[in-house]
Image: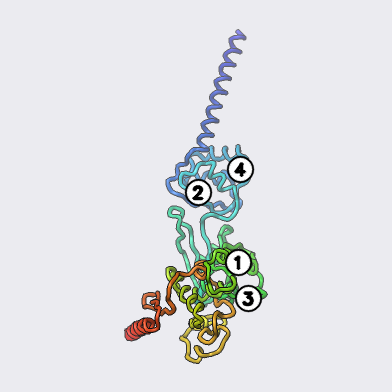
Amino acid sequence: MWRHIVSNFLTLLVVAVFLLGGVILWGQQQYSARGPLSDAICLRVEPGSTMRRVSSRLESDGAVTSGAIFRIGAEYSEKDALLKAGSWLIPEAASMAEITDIITRGGASTCGTEVVYRLGVTSAEVVVRELDAATGRYEERAKFDPAAEGEVPAEFTQVREQADTRYRVALAEGVTSWQVVEGLKSVDVLTGEVAEVPAEGTLAPDSYEVRAGDTRESVLTRMSEAQAVILAAAWQGRAEGLPLQSAQEALILASIIEKETGVADERRQVASVFVNRLNRGMRLQTDPTVIYGVTEGKGVLGRGLRQSELRGATPWNTYVIEGLPPTPIANPGRASIEAAVDPDTTDYVFFVADGTGGHAFAETLDEHNRNVARWRAIEAERGNN
C-alpha cells in the first residue's frame, strides 16, 4: 500500500514539475515575444514609481499582455529595482524584455516634452514642444520671445516643473559669436557667466542638448570643439588650386558665403564667384562684410547701407580692402564651410538678387548690369504695391 502511495506521489510530483516547467517556458516566451502595441507610445515614469505601478500602466495602455508576467520577468532578470524616472518611447510591438530594458537603462528621456532655446540671426525664441509617439514628430505647444515683456506661457511653467523635461539650444547658421553669448544669457537652465566672447566663426551652428545646471562656458566649449572638427575635415578634403592659404581663410570665406545666400543649392556657386574674384585680384565687394564693419557683429543693422558706409574704411569693408577680411563675419554652418573649400567650377564673377530668394549670376559686367536692372525693376514694382 505504501509503495502504491509513494508511486502515485512521485507520479504527481513529476507531472507537477513538468507542468511548472511548461509554465515557466511559456512565461519566458511571453516575456520575449513580440508585444501587442500597434503604435508607439510615450511612457512617463514618475519619480518614486514602482514596477507594479508601471506594469499596470503598461497593461492598461495595451503595451503588455500581462502585468504579472512583466513584473516576474523584470524580477527574474534582476532589473526590477533599476526603474528610472523619465519619459520613455516604447516602440511598436516592443516585447516585455525590450520594454524592461528601456525603462531601466537610464540616460536622457527619449520622448515627452522638451524646451528648445532657438538663437537666430535676427531674434531668439523659446519653443515648448512634445513628441507625438505615433508619428515620431514633435508638436509645438507654446512659443515666446524671451526678451519680450508679458506673461510666460503656462505650458512653459508646467514643463519646467517636470523632472524629465529635456532642454536644447539650437544655433542658427550665420549668427555672430556676440549674438550667441547674448542668447545664452536667456537660457535660464544654464549657469555661470561668459568670460570672453569666442572668436568669430569658431562656433558650430547646430542643436545641442543641455542639462539644467550646465554652465554657459561648457556649452560654448562644445560648440567650439564641434566647429574645429568640421573645419579640419573640410580643409583636409579641400579642392586643389584654391586661393586660400589656411583653414582660417576658408572659415572667413565660408562666413561670407553664409551671409550672402540662404539657398542651399547656391552655396557652391556663390563660393565660385568669390574664388574667381580672388584668383583675378578683384575685390570681393560684398555687403555683409560692410555691415559687419559697422556693427562688429553686435546686433542687427536694421536698415540699408549708406553710401558713406560702403566707402568707409574698416578692416572688413571688402569694397575698400583687397582680398579677405581679417576675421570671419559670422559663424558658418557645415554646408558653407564645405562650399568654401570645394566651390563649383564657373566663370562667374558677379551675382545679384533675382527676386525669388536666390541670385542671378553673371560672367561679364554687361550681363551683370542687366541682372541689376531687372532686380531694381522688381524692387520698384514691390514698392508700388
Amino acid type indicated by mark 3? Val
- Mark pair 3, 2: CA separation: 42 Å
Which residue, given by chain and number where applicable, does mark 2 sit on? 90
Viewer-side label of 4, 2: 2
Q: Can you say whether 112 is above or below 15 in the image?
A: below
Q: Are marks 4 and 2 in contact (CB under 8 Å)?
A: no
Q: Which mark is nearer the camera, 3 or 2?
A: 3
Of pointers 3 and 1, the one earlier in the residue sequence: 3
Between disc 4 and disc 3, the foreground one is: 3
* Percent coordinates x, y for residue 266 in the rendering: 43, 71
User: Which residue: 57% across, 38% down?
Assistant: 73
- Crowding around mark 3 (Cα neighbors within 10 Å: few <14, some 14 to 19, many 20+) is some
Q: Which residue is mark 4?
A: 80
Q: Amino acid at mark 4?
A: Asp
| CA gap, disc 4 and disc 3 | 48 Å
Q: Nearer the viewer, residue 133 or 310?
A: 310
Residue at 50 percent across and 65 percent down: it is 128
Check the image and report above or below for 68 versus 200.
above
**Crowding at label 4, few (<14), some or many (≥20) Cα neighbours within 10 Å?**
some
Q: Residue at x 32, y 84 (%)?
A: 381
Which residue was labeled with disc 3? 197
Q: CA distance from mark 3 to mark 1?
A: 16 Å
Residue 75: x and y in percent read 60, 39
Tell me the element at label 1. helix
Secondary element type, mark 3: loop
With respect to residue 322, does 263 lie above or below?
Answer: above
